[in-house]
Image (tube, helix red, strand yellow):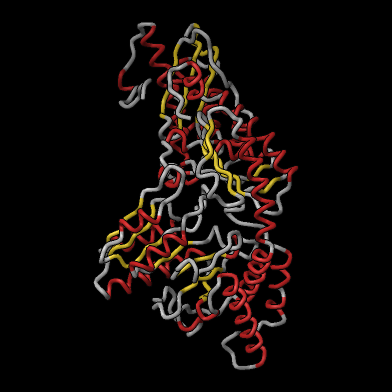
Amino acid sequence: MQVYADNAATTKMSPTAIAAMLPYFDTVYGNPSSLHTPGQKAKEALENARATVAKCLGCEPREIIFTSGGSEADNQAILSAARLGARRGKKHIISTAFEHHAVLHTLNKLEDEGFEVTLLDVHENGLVTAQQVKEAIRPDTCLVTVMYANNEIGTIQPIAEIGAVCKEAGVPFHTDAVQAVGHLPIDVKKENIDLLSLSAHKFHGPKGVGALYVRHRFPLVNVIEGGAQERGKRAGTENLPGICGMAAALAESCAHMEANAKKVSALRDRLIQGLSQIPHSAVNGDLEHRLPGNVSFCFEGIEGESLLLLLDSKGVCASSGSACTSGSLDPSHVLLAIGRVHDVAHGSLRLTLCEYNTDEEIDHILKTVPEVVTYLRNMSPVWRDLQVGKRQYIL
Amino acid sequence: MALYSEKVMDHFMHPRNVGVLENPSGVGEVGNAKCGDIMKIYLKIENDIITDVKFETFGCGSAIASSSMATEMIKGKPVKEAMALTNKAVAEALDGLPAYKMHCSVLAEEAIKNALLDYYQKNGIPYDEADFPEGHSHEE
């Protein structure tokens, strides 16, 4: 049995999304910028896709810019707000310590250019509060960027409350909603969001395509210069098959959101409850404000990469925030941000589910993970030291 | 999985010499939990021959595979040969390690050297300090 439980990394495409893409490879293959009939048919498909995406977010079609994915959307949103701020003499940005690297590394770049960045501390339950944002806002703050839901621990931030704080202070608000779109109900107007990033392959759409919602009249700067596509804000011939696949996948996810969330969160809760039986383990992140599909644990005395390799050999595809899986010496910045110490953060496991997962698959995971954890603990000198009292348990 | 060679995967999936030795002649432990790698090696030495060796490792796939391979390479060998084991030899015997995993083979070499140092010290055997570069320690 192979169980794919890494849906926060990427998802399997839905048959609906695949079918929606196919005509645009060899039938409606014109360039949307061309004046001839095939081009205009392509243009029509492009605008239909834009309307579909806009409807799912509660915005106008002209407020959607198609991009190559979530990272590009994050970059463009943040750089645009920064440039606007700089023109007004405002060079302070507020974000959080556990953002995706697409956000954090863009902020690092801005710091090198003289911007000041305040990274809010994340509470140990994996949440920041609107109050924290409110207290951090200064007269020279030009952007607040807070992720909608965290990619590693699945915690959902109080976006509507943060949006209200930003609106009151007159500060632009961006949210990296890559993990949330298609899974949580989102209304950018009600939530006072000015900029929102999304990525198609996180909701059963194709890879390499995403979108940036940008509130009407908010001035964007270009990350990619060239032709006049996307109202002149994102050059390059549009990835029409990808865009149509994304729109179809998003429409499908939004149509079945409630049923999917109910099914997936039931699987998630079974998994969390079962894995909690493993001694000296802990769930990462709040249990209530949590994505329907996210399960994140730390197991004391073992290391995550060896855990993943053994799980893979037994048919369970998962991920980890250990240093060895990231190729650096430090474990996941997300786990460190919520206060997990290095020793424990190395032994993390993330299982992310979707509506294609089944109860039988959860049974398989629940049988396999405890076996593998026990096996690795039995060869771990750390575990031996913990058991004989030479080292104190943290979890 | 293409990350590791077949040899690495074999030694990771089926590690040789896992465990502890009662009354070992020497014990060496290197690394720390903060960095995500700890290796502990136990040696049984009789008449200058390593008659038995066991290891315990907390770490990634290549750390476990390096421990397993290194113990195989010194088992039944004279102490002098074990002293000469290099991390490069361990990595080569595993058909190579990814560049950022080479430190796993370094840990294996250091753990063995630490266990040998422990053996020398316990038995009052003279040794050349130059063979044990600084930074090797039983404790964190």
Where residue B32 appears, as percent x and y from the top left, is 41, 29
Where residue A19 appears, as percent x and y from the top left, is 73, 70
Q: For residue A342, what is the image quadrant?
A: top left
Residue A125 in the figure: left or right of residue A48: left
Residue B61 in sight? yes
In the image, residue A39 sits, relative to residue B35, either above or below, namely below
Residue at position x 63%, y 65% from top? A206
Residue at position x 53%, y 61% from top? A178
Residue B96 in sight? no
Residue A68 in the figure: left or right of residue A265: left
| Number of on-image labels | 0
Where residue A367 appears, as percent x and y from the top left, is 69, 34
- The residue furthest bottom is A36
In the foreground, A107 or B111: A107
In the foreground, B114 or A45: A45
- Quadrant containing the N terminus of chain A is top right
Q: For residue A89, what is the image quadrant?
A: bottom left
In the image, residue B12 sits, relative to residue A203, either above or below, namely above
In the foreground, B84 or A110: A110
Where residue A171 appears, as percent x and y from the top left, is 35, 68
In the foreground, B74 or A73: A73
In the image, residue A223 sits, relative to residue A295, either above or below, namely below
Residue at position x 55%, y 14% from top? B52
